[in-house]
Image (tube, rainbow, N blue to C red):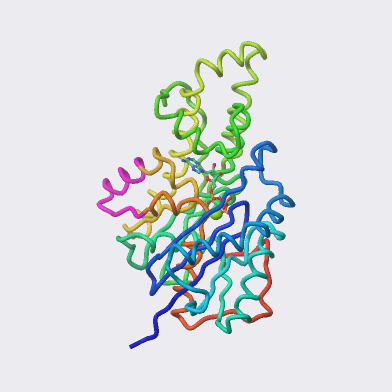
């Protein structure tokens, strides 16, 4: 019988300090500590983020171990996000993990944050078979992928400018909403009229995306009002504007997915990353897959945004292939998936 695997996952790539424990591939605990101190700056301040990780990481790890009922000495391996992300933030997680690996005499593996988002699908009861397609929609990335096996990917298309989450956050800022605006735009849209204003949908050839046009279009639309008038308009029509913007983004996200399902014949499609929490995107994607006689896979809400459970799962899949990192491994802020 193989020895029980007890993995500790650590995620510190941006502004969430997270740790999780995975026992034999099953999630035993997941703890995420967010950093509200960035809200007043309208975005993540790298220096504040890395200092906060250093302060929070020990207690977040202790809490994850305690919730899982696991002691440090029970751990058989460690997994950490090595990139992409903010260099100072990544270095806190990677250095901590390497020190723990040496102290406990157990192996560690550094994984790509996006591979973590892809692995979030394997935290659910119903997991996708290989090959499957997966749309990553997060704060820093928007890309449509074909996954043939653990660690075997192909990027079919990606954004040429802003990521979808970035578009939500930037448009939110234009509308006067707090960062990150995605969840609030989703909430406000529920009571809004999606047909209130028709924002242009950018559709590129193939499977690529572009969201800079819609951001500019919202800005031009609001700038067409005099300042006082604009504030009144925003007050009276905010849910309608949010719903109209959101519908355009969802249309743009789903168009290449539909084409990829048709072109590849692969009918199992995952949706991951922070924007996969969006209620309208989930609903429309589910409708699209029903119409294609296919199946949609999404992580539970808790594992859409950054977390360490998905990082532990990505490491679990890699360790099962016999891989591990050397102590010479270092954080890489611009790490590529391929
Ligand atoms: N319900 C929602 N609707 C739309 N956007 C959302 C929703 N919930 C979260 N988001 C967006 O998700 C993004 C955060 O996702 P995530 O934490 O995966 O990104 P990130 O880790 O910063 O980027 P990356 O994973 O590309 O490095 C933010 O842009 C946020 O506005
Ligand atoms: Mg992320």
| Residue 295 falls within the magenta-colored stretch | yes
Residue 82 to residue 4: above or below: above
The image quarter in which residue 120 lies: bottom left
Q: Give me the residue at 62% from left, 47% from top.
A: 35
The verdict on residue 90 being magenta is: no
Tell me, yes or no, if residue 76 can be seen here: yes
Q: Quadrant of the C terminus?
A: bottom right
Q: Main secondary structure of the magenta part?
A: helix
Judge by depth and name the residue closer to the eye, 107 or 113: 107
Q: Which stretch appears magenta?
A: 283-297
- Residue drawn where x is 50% and y is 24% of the image: 241
Q: Nearer the viewer, residue 268 or 19?
A: 19
Q: Position of residue 117 (x, y in %)?
A: 49, 59
State the residue lying farthest toward the bottom. 1
Q: Residue lying furthest right in this view?
A: 47
Residue 32 drawn at (x, y percent): 52, 54
Give the quarter of the figure containing the N terminus: bottom left
Residue 190 image offset from top left, x and y in percent: 40, 29
Q: Is residue 19 left or right of residue 3?
A: right
Q: Is residue 206 visible?
A: no
Q: Position of residue 56 (x, y in %)?
A: 63, 57
What residue is at 59 percent from the left and 35 percent from the top?
213
């Amino acid at each position: 019988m193989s020895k029980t695997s007890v993995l500790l996952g650590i995620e510190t790539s941006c502004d969430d300090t997270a740790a999780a424990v995975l026992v034999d591939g099953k999630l035993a605990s997941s703890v995420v500590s967010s950093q509200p101190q960035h809200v007043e700056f309208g975005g993540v301040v790298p220096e504040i983020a890395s200092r906060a990780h250093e302060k929070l990481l020990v207690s977040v790890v202790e809490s994850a171990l305690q919730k899982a009922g696991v002691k440090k000495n029970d751990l058989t391996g460690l997994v950490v996000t090595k990139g992409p992300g903010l260099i100072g933030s990544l270095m806190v997680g990677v250095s901590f993990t390497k020190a723990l690996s040496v102290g406990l005499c157990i192996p560690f593996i550094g994984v790509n944050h996006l591979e973590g988002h892809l692995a979030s699908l394997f935290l659910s009861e119903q997991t996708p078979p290989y090959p499957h397609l997966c749309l990553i929609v997060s704060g820093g990335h928007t890309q449509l992928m074909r996954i043939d096996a653990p660690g075997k990917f192909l990027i079919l298309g990606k954004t040429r400018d802003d990521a979808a989450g970035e578009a939500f956050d930037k448009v939110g800022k234009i509308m006067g909403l707090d960062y990150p605006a995605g969840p609030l735009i989703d909430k406000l849209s529920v009571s809004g009229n999606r047909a209130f204003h028709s924002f242009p949908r950018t559709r590129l050839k193939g499977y690529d995306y572009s969201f800079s046009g819609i951001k500019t279009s919202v800005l031009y639309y609001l700038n067409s009002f005099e300042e006082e008038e604009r504030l009144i308009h925003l007050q009276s029509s905010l849910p309608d504007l949010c719903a109209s913007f959101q519908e355009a983004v969802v249309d743009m996200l789903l168009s290449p997915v539909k084409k990829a399902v048709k072109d590849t014949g692969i009918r199992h499609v995952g949706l991951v990353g922070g924007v996969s929490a969006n209620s309208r995107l989930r609903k429309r994607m589910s409708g699209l897959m029903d119409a294609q006689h296919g199946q949609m896979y999404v992580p539970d809400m808790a594992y859409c945004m950054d977390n360490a459970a998905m990082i532990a799962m990505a490491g679990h899949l890699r360790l099962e292939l016999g891989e591990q990192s050397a102590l010479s491994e270092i954080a890489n802020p611009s790490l590529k998936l391929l």
